[in-house]
Amino acid sequence: MKALARALGIDPGTKSFDLVVIDNDRVVWEKSIETADIARDPKVLIEAIEEAGRVDLIAGPSGYGTPIVCNEDIIDPYTFALEILLLTRREDIEEGMERGEPGIAVYKAIADTVAVLWEKRARVCYIPSVILLPTVPRYRKINRIDMGTADKMAIAVLGVFDQSRRLGISYEETSFILIEMGYGYNAVLAIDHGRIVDGYGGTLVPTGFLTIGSIDAEVVVAGRSWSRSDVFYGGVSTICNEYSVEKALEKALREETCRDAFKNMYESIVRIVYAINKSLEKPREIILSGRLSRVPEIREAIEKLLEDIAPVTKIQGLPGARISKEAAQGYATVGEGIAHGFFHDLIKHMGIDKARGTVFDYLYHPRLLMAKKRLLNAYMKSIRAESLRKIIGSTSL
């Protein structure tokens, strides 16, 4: 008989933070808070966590991911949040907030949340991204960082449970391509035999709604100097000059350039799906999730373009969920599994507890040697020495 566990998941979305409490496999409480509100005052989030009541574990906002790290492992929460979870500097956040950039607000909100949760000694753990999982072959990780951030990994966990339940099959028998279409980024992940085997994260999928995604290296050279906040420009919203998805769609009916931006986003997703399809034996389904997948015009366009590969469906989520996004439910699912509850077998099957290393481990360009060293130093500065070896492994050290 499985243990009873009650877990809280926190999804740090570009537009909103969603909080979900699950008891075994059912959502029993949920709340959504604007990211900008948390960036202005992190106490808003802490009050919501207190409102959620007793939980055995919190799966905290994990950004670019880390092997499972819990509050008791951390000695410097600011370094941990900024340099490990966010791969950024305090100056980048301060400059972005001064300019009022919505993408940077989520970075500030995450950093503040990690620090406050640490100060309150909350029972919180931070979770891996796709590149840290042992189920992804090493050769696919070469010169990659974002194969799917922690929230995308968590959605894939939810997807495995979702398909297993809907089709009446075991975790081992699940197989699908996950397309996550968020307000900021899009991502495409391959799940085979119930394990993540490949992924293209938001900065590897050209043209998100907010973000530029992957770009020609010649464009990078032409731009000369780039900052963290630059990733939040160049997407559909920039081309349409409109931050609202609905208003951008309306503008696309009148303006060819805006219409082309949406076509480019759709086609870029389709191209990645065809590419990642080679990483699976045969996907049973293509599963859609994310804020944009709930917009009928966008969902219908993607479904029409991909129906030749496999049946396209929308992720169902956990019983009891009404307002929360899939990522928040996924975070809670992972947290409940870490707490040895209903989803413990799923977490073990997907190898999440075996995640090791740093997200820079597979970078080989000589210009990035200092960045790899800085990240390793950040781990050594922010994590207790006795926890380091089990978290990042002897090869990284």
Image (cartoon, helix red, strand yellow):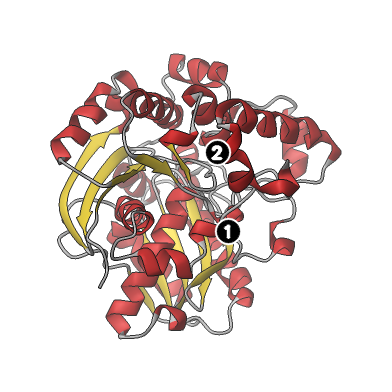
Residue type at numbered disc 1: Leu
Inspect this view and state whether residue 84 appears. Answer: yes
Label 2 Cα neighbours within 10 Å, binned few <14 / some 14-19 / many ≥20: many
Q: What quarter of the picture does the C terminus occupy?
A: top right
Q: Quadrant of residue 272?
A: bottom right
- Direction right: furthest residue: 366
Q: Secondary structure at mark 2?
A: loop
Residue type at numbered disc 2: Gly
Residue pointed to by mark 1: 133
| Residue 202 position within the rendered picture, expressed as x and y whole percent measured from the top left | 53, 49
Q: Earlier in the sequence, mark 1 or mark 2?
A: 1
Inspect this view and state whether residue 288 appears. Answer: no
| Residue 269 position within the rendered picture, expressed as x and y whole percent measured from the top left | 52, 61
Q: What quarter of the picture does the N terminus occupy?
A: bottom left
| Residue 166 position within the rendered picture, expressed as x and y whole percent measured from the top left | 28, 80
Label 1 Cα neighbours within 10 Å, binned few <14 / some 14-19 / many ≥20: many
Residue pointed to by mark 2: 234
